[in-house]
Image (tube, grey):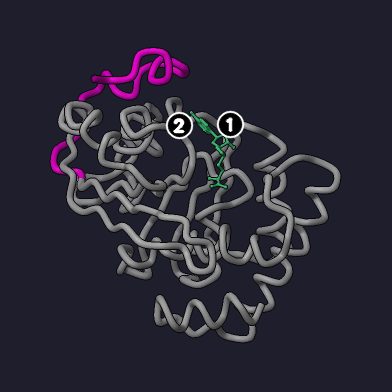
Amino acid sequence: MIILEEMLVDLLGIQLTRKQVDAFCIYERMLQDWNKRTNLTAIHEAQEIRIKHFYDSLTCLKLIGDSKSTLIDIGCGAGFPGIPLKIVQENIRLVLVDAVRKKTEFCSALAAELDLKDVVILHERAETLGQNPAYREKFDWAVARAVAPLPILTEYLLPLVRPGGAALAQKGRSVQTEIEQSQNAIRLLGGKLQEVLEFELPMTHEIRSLVKIRKITPTPKIYPRKAGIPVKKPLS
Ligand code: SAM
């Protein structure tokens, strides 16, 4: 884990404890192990897992200040970014959501192995949860990495955020076009673009962006629309 530890201290100012390093070792091993049987992620090699999954997930901490936040990770796949964030910020109350059962099964097995507290894992679609009163407008943060273009993603995330909270989208380079295309969607859903951070992922020369959208007013009841509609007819 040495590469991850050094990068976190140098670039994010985070010093991992022994327990956190052990947790990332278990995560890496389980991910590689499950990946042999079922296709969870395209990244298999240890160094890539540490940089492109663990480190990349933790860059959200550049914007997520409060360690006691409630956070929902939509389209978490094998737990990114939610589980690395939970390992480092133990007090986060986390909900992980994915539409594919084998991915939520992996997250459940990992959360049990790491004995993570205050974690709920749901095999569900974002559009369904966004209309469920138990989840709608309940979160300080709704986050997503590599799930959908921004005009669609805002319809998944913003209905889940409480007014005053924020949606956080992890994106690659050239996010400006997506932002321009999602201006109207953000406004319709009660949001306001607050901040875009662009940086290079260490040792890769790959550009990443963090897009923070603050929730200003409650989302109108009609959003999110039924499952599949945001993809078929993105808000424009
Ligand atoms: N966030 C993870 C990561 O960065 O490694 C996984 C990214 S993967 C490319 C996209 C994930 O989003 C898939 O696991 C897919 O099942 C999930 N997904 C896509 N649309 C969704 C929706 N409407 N509701 C819930 N999950 C969704």
Give the farthest residue toward the right. 37
> Magenta region: which residues?
215-236
Disc 2 crowd, CA 10 A, few/some/many (<14, 14-19, 20+): many
Is residue 220 in the magenta section? yes
- Residue 62: percent from left, percent from top: 34, 67
Drawn side of residue 206 relative to residue 142, left or right: right
Q: From the image, which quarter does the C terminus lie in? A: top left
Disc 2 residue lies near ligand 1 with CB under 8 A: yes
C-alpha span from label 1 to label 2? 8 Å
Please state which amino acid type lies under the numbered disc 1: Ala
The front one of 26 and 41 is 41
Q: Which of marks 1 and 2 is nearer the N terminus?
A: 1
Asked which quadrant contains residue 135, the reply is top left
For residue 49, above or below residue 24: above
| Label 1 lies in ligand 1 vicinity (Cβ under 8 Å) | yes
* Identity of the residue drawn at 40% across and 49% down: 170
> Which quarter shows the N terminus?
bottom right
Disc 1 to disc 2: CB gap under 8 Å: yes
Q: Which residue is drawn at 67% across and 67% down?
A: 47
- Secondary structure found at label 2: helix
* Residue 99: mark: 1
Quadrant in the picture for residue 192 = top left
Q: Estimate the x, y position of residue 67 in percent, counting from the top left.
A: 37, 70
- Residue 153 shown in magenta: no
Identified by mark 2, the residue type is: Ala
Front-lying residue, 12 or 132: 12
Q: On residue 69, which mark appears?
A: none
Label 1, secondary structure: give it: loop
Label 2: which residue? 126
Is residue 138 shown left or right of residue 72? Answer: left
In percent of width and height, residue 230 lies at 38, 20
What crowding class fits label 1: few (fewer than 14 Cα within 10 Å), some (14-19), or many (20 or more)?
A: some
